Image (cartoon, helix red, strand yellow):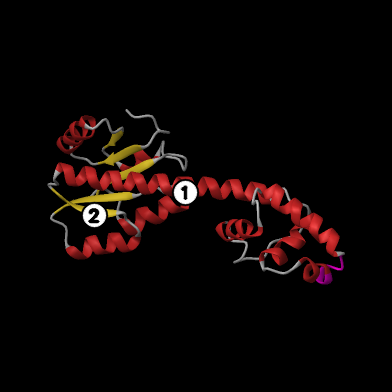
Amino acid sequence: MANWTSPTVYVIDPDPLVRRGLTELFSSVSLPAAYFARLDTCLTGLENNNRGCLLIDAGVDGCQPAKLLPHLAQREIHLPVIYLAQRPEIATAVNALKAGAFDFLEKPFHGQALLDCVQAALAVDQKTTTERQQHLVFLERFDKLTPREREVLPLLIRGLSNRQIAEQLSLSPKTVEVHRNRIIRKTGAENPARLIRMAIRIGLLDRPYHTD
């Protein structure tokens, strides 16, 4: 079985023949995969730090998109989900995609088409993982700011000048300049434009920034 922390295809399919075929397919391209006949056995070890994608037979109990995808989101498991189904109705596939599934493929599937879909899902997972990690790094940097720097920050990212900030906070422009330099240094922003982009990434322009 594949390492849980490496990018892995987590297959949930009750048909041993399908699992055997997928084992041969993924092994042929050295793609790590883990195989399960039931949803619960897969979810037992699945955590929010697992990387890869889920490849699921749509008929598995509990795997219906409207039920499973919100459950995964609640557990903060963000793996792309690819569904497989034997002669699925168009409405079933459409509803799965609307619910947030990455893709919906019909059985029997073409090996290369499935590999292409899985590789695309893995690429998306890698991208979103990198973005989430960067988000956490930015949050940690902003958390280092002092209460006064947190008062200056929202005014700074709104584009106010040192003098305008000084007037609003009853400070001297020179003091504001000191806080401004410290904010840029602590966040690693390098310049105000970069600081604004970082603030957007972590949502500081969309919500109040608490100063306590």
Label 1 and label 2: CA atoms lie apart by 23 Å
Please check the rendered image and state whether residue 169 is part of the magenta-colored stretch, yes or no: yes
Mark 2 residue element: strand
Q: Is residue 100 left or right of residue 94?
A: right
Mark 1 residue element: loop
Between residue 130 and residue 184, name the one nearer to us.
184
The residue under label 1 is: 75
Please check the rendered image and state whether residue 106 is part of the magenta-colored stretch, yes or no: no
Examine the residues drawn in magenta and state their main secondary structure.
helix
User: What residue type is disc 2 on?
Assistant: Phe
Q: Quadrant of the C terminus?
A: bottom right
Between residue 186 and residue 193, name the one nearer to us.
193
- Residue 176 vertical placement versus 124 (above, below): below
Q: Quadrant of the N terminus?
A: top left
Q: Is residue 62 visible?
A: no
The residue under label 2 is: 104
Q: Is residue 211 left or right of residue 8?
A: right
Q: Residue at x 65, y 55 (%)?
A: 191
Question: At which x and y percent is residue 2?
Answer: 34, 29
Q: Residue at x 45, y 40 (%)?
A: 47
Q: Picture quarter containing residue 26?
A: top left
The numbered dot on residue 159 is: none
User: What residue type is disc 1 on?
Assistant: Arg
Between residue 191 and residue 146, name the one nearer to us.
191
Between residue 146 and residue 57, name the one nearer to us.
146
Highlighted range, magenta: 167-171
